[in-house]
């Protein structure tokens, strides 16, 4: 088995175990908020922490020399050249409110490049996977299928997802940018979970996605899944995707959305 396939197998097994735990152990009255981060609505629950601890424990048991970057602080150095980028619950607010679209996102990088990614959506019964060079797959009750983005969708017909940060200033700017996007696309979706939006682009359930303010753990697995499904994931003017801006879409649609966003100055806050 190649290293990316080996890492992917571990990512999938671990994401599924964490996903099951998050469903089975979700307190009946909802999880407790144990911390807030960038704003009072940017929350961490005890379940985010428990899931990250489980993921790190499982991966360390299998690969003790690997490094980690975890949303909830599980960051540590390693000596193997492999780093795991982990969001134990992407879409924590959906999880808090018992909305179904949240996910466990685990990516493995080798020397800084993502080579394997798994996004587990327990409430949908779906697992999205990609190993670099091996395509992207959706595994669900009905079977496994290869993913392909929608390409060359004219912007006026494109269903575009976006998301909003937690800080008020950032949200005010994002609302202004949205007024420039909304009249030019089919419609907008705000699902609440970055990696779910990316997987939906990969699956052709959305034509495009853009957001400012997402972190490495939100996009690491999902971006690889979009790329392996034939799509582009970048920032403005060829920049790497990341917290400044992440745009994901198929060829043709990507360029059109990029050129619509650039003059709207989405980085100005
Ligand atoms: C958030 C979600 C959301 C996006 C936010 C992210 P979290 O991640 O991905 O869709 O709009 O920017 O911070 O905080 O739930 O892990």
Image (cartoon, rainbow, N blue to C red):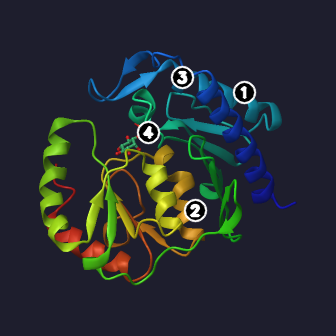
The residue identified by callout 4 is 91
Q: Is residue 167 left or right of residue 26?
A: left
Asked if ligand 1 lies within 8 A of label 1, the reply is no
Label 4 to label 1: alpha-carbon separation: 22 Å
Q: Is residue 60 visible?
A: yes
The residue identified by callout 3 is 47
Q: Is residue 10 left or right of residue 225?
A: right
Q: Position of residue 111 (x, y in %)?
A: 65, 55
Asked if ligand 1 lies within 8 A of label 4, the reply is yes
Q: Are marks 2 and 1 in contact (CB under 8 Å)?
A: no
Above or below, comparing residue 78 to residue 234 in the picture: above
Label 3 to label 2: alpha-carbon separation: 26 Å
**Chain-order first, disc 2 or disc 1:** 1
How many marks are shown on the rendered structure?
4
Q: Position of residue 214 (x, y in %)?
A: 38, 47
Choose mark 2 or mark 1, whichever is in front.
Answer: 2
* Mark 3 residue element: helix
| Residue visible at 39% across and 29% down in the picture | 97
* Mark 1 residue element: helix
Q: Position of residue 52 (x, y in %)?
A: 60, 29
């Amino acid at each position: 088995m190649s290293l990316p396939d080996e890492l992917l197998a571990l990512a999938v097994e671990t994401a599924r175990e964490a996903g099951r735990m998050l469903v089975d152990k979700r307190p009946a009255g909802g999880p407790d908020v144990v911390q807030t981060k960038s704003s009072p609505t940017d929350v961490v629950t005890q379940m985010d922490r428990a899931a990250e601890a489980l993921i790190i424990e499982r991966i360390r048991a299998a690969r003790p020399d690997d490094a980690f970057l975890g949303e909830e602080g599980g960051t540590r150095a390693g000596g193997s050249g492999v780093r795991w980028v982990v969001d134990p619950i992407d879409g924590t607010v959906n999880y808090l409110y018992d909305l179904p679209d949240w996910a466990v996102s685990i990516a493995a990088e080798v020397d800084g490049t993502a080579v394997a990614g798994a996004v587990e959506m327990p409430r949908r019964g779906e697992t999205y996977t990609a190993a670099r060079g091996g395509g992207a797959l959706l595994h669900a009750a009905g079977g496994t299928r290869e993913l392909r983005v929608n390409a060359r969708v004219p912007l006026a017909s494109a269903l575009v997802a976006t998301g909003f940060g937690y800080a008020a200033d950032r949200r005010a700017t994002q609302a202004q940018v949205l007024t420039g996007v909304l009249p030019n696309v089919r419609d907008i979706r705000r699902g609440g979970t970055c990696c779910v939006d990316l997987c939906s682009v990969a699956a052709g359930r959305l034509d495009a996605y853009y957001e400012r303010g997402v972190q490495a753990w939100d996009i690491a697995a999902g971006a690889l899944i979009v790329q392996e499904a034939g799509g582009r994931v970048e920032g403005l003017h060829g920049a790497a995707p990341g917290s400044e801006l992440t745009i994901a879409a198929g060829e043709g649609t990507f360029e059109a959305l990029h050129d619509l966003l650039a003059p709207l100055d989405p980085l100005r806050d």
